[in-house]
Every structure is written in structure tokens, then in C-alpha cells.
Image (tube, rainbow, N blue to C red):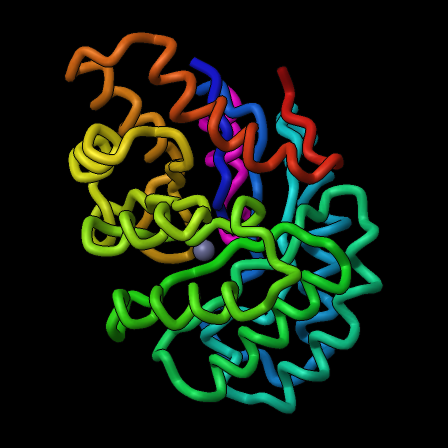
Amino acid sequence: MRYIEPHAHMVSRTTDDYIAMATAGCAAICEPAFWAGFDRSSPRGFFDYFRQLTEHEPKRAAKYGVPHFCWLCINPKEAEDVKLATEVIEFIPEFLEAANVLGIGEIGLNKNSRNELKVLEMHVDLAARHDQLILIHTPHLEDKLKGTRLTLDVLKNDRRIRPERCILDHVEEHTVGLVLDSGCWAGMTLYPETKCTSARAVDILERYGSERLWMNSACDWGVSVPLAVLYAALEMRRRGHDAAAIDRAIFGNPLRFLSQCAKFKPAM
Ligand SMILES: [Zn+2]
């Protein structure tokens, strides 16, 4: 099976994970900028992290034959500090030309606060000015439905933004319809404890069709499974989905969305 991992935080994973993913057929890994598990103390912390994502991690992935791509932003968990966010957003453009940068992400809301909303708008403006794809995180802690609505309003209010170039991640049963109706893409995150299980994700695929949906492991430094996308593929196979449908869900769809950025080239 070939597949694309469209959302993984590889800086916190071991080389064993790269080997497992590569041998399982991973044709590309995409890494959104994320929280380190603790707040960074200054904008320089982000500068170094962006260098890690654009220079170091692609070289690490290349050792296992997997093309590595990334998204840049100050993530929602650190976006409460508007001054810090403003300073970080100022130097993001100098990284956008890097060969593996796909766009701005994962931006969005965490606690649906006013400051987070302001920083979300700043990121959307940054993406519009530089014609970048957008990857959005939807809240887990606070009200996901409210956070999804607020996020879609921000996108809708900026006339420069084309919904087919935006993906809202971590959707669940109560938010997926709203996202797809907006014209945006939707991502399902497969976590062993929280978010979607494989069975729930495949239920959603069966109910909403697979046209603008993808699945990811969002593996990071917490409890998560780097091969989760393939576990969902096995669930599809168990339910009788044919090879073409499985390939579309785990390879064709992410390929279609990500190829809107000319830099995206999976190993074929
Ligand atoms: Zn993430």
C-alpha cells in the first residue's frame, strides 16, 4: 500500500518511526508547525524551530527515502500572546521560499479566545498575501463546534481566501458536514485515546463520501500512533472497500489537496 502522512510532528519521533513508515509505503510526510509541549521563551525559539523544519528534518527523512514537507506558523497554543505572535509572523516570509514549505499551518483556535482569533486572522492575512495553502487545527479542549464556526467565519470574511485551498483538521462527526459545506477540505486525526478512532473515521468516510477528506496520525510527543493511517486502511479493507477506494482515501486525496502547492512531490 502507498500512502501519504499529511500531518505528523516528526521532530518528536524516533528514527524507528521513520523506518516503520517508510517500510509501510509512506510516500511523503507533511509536518505542521506545532507546540513543543512547553511554551517557547522568545521569537528566536520559533526561528530555530523553522530552521529545524525546513533544513534539518527533510535531511533526516531523506535518509529513509521519504520526502518531508512542512507548514509554518505560531501554533494556537502559543497564540494567546499577540505580541509574540506578531514578532514570529513577521519573519515567517523569509522561510516561505524554502523547498519543502507547503503553506501556513497548523493555525486556528485552542480555547476560542479573542487573542487567538486575532492571531488566526493575522495568519490568514499572511497566507493571502503570499498565496499559501492553509492548514487549520480545530479545538479539542473547548467547544470544537463553536471553534469550527468561528474559524470558517474568519476564512469567509477574507475575500482573498479560496476554500478549496484550506483544510480544517481534527474534524469529528458534529463538525465534518459544516466544513465540507463551506467548500474547505476536512482532515480526520486518528488517535488511540482522543479524537477519531479508525472505525469512527471510516464511518465518516462512508457517510460523507471521500471527496475532500483525508486522514492523518498527527503523531507527536504524546500518545499517538505513526502508522494510524494504515490502521484505518485496514479497517476499510475489513469492511469491503476495494483497493482503489483505499488508495484514494490514503494517497489520492492528500495528493490532490497538497499538489495545489507546486513544491509538493511525493515519492511515486
Ligand atoms: Zn498537529
Residue at (73% x, 39% y) in the render: 59
The quadrant in which the N terminus is found is top left
From what the image shows, is residue 168 above or below residue 22?
below
Residue at (47, 68) in percent of width and height: 108
Residue 114 image offset from top left, x and y in percent: 44, 88
Residue displayed at 43% across by 53% down = 168
Q: Is residue 181 left or right of residue 262?
A: left
Q: Main secondary structure of the magenta part?
A: helix
Q: Which residues are magenta?
A: 9-23
Q: Is residue 22 magenta?
A: yes
Horizontal and vertical percent position of residue 18: 53, 33
Position of the C terminus, as image quadrant, is: top right
Q: Residue at x 51, y 25 (%)?
A: 26
**Image quarter where ligand 1 lies:** bottom left
Relative to 187, is 5 on the left or the right? right
Instruction: Say whether residue 89 is magenta.
Output: no
Q: Residue 246, located in which quarter of the rendered image?
A: top left
In this rendering, is residue 107 above or below 244?
Answer: below
| Front-most of residues 91 and 133 | 133
Q: Nearer the viewer, residue 236 or 204?
A: 204
Quadrant for residue 186, please give it: top left
Where is residue 192 shown, x and y percent of the image? 22, 45
Residue 166 picture location, percent across and down: 53, 51
Q: How many marks?
A: 0
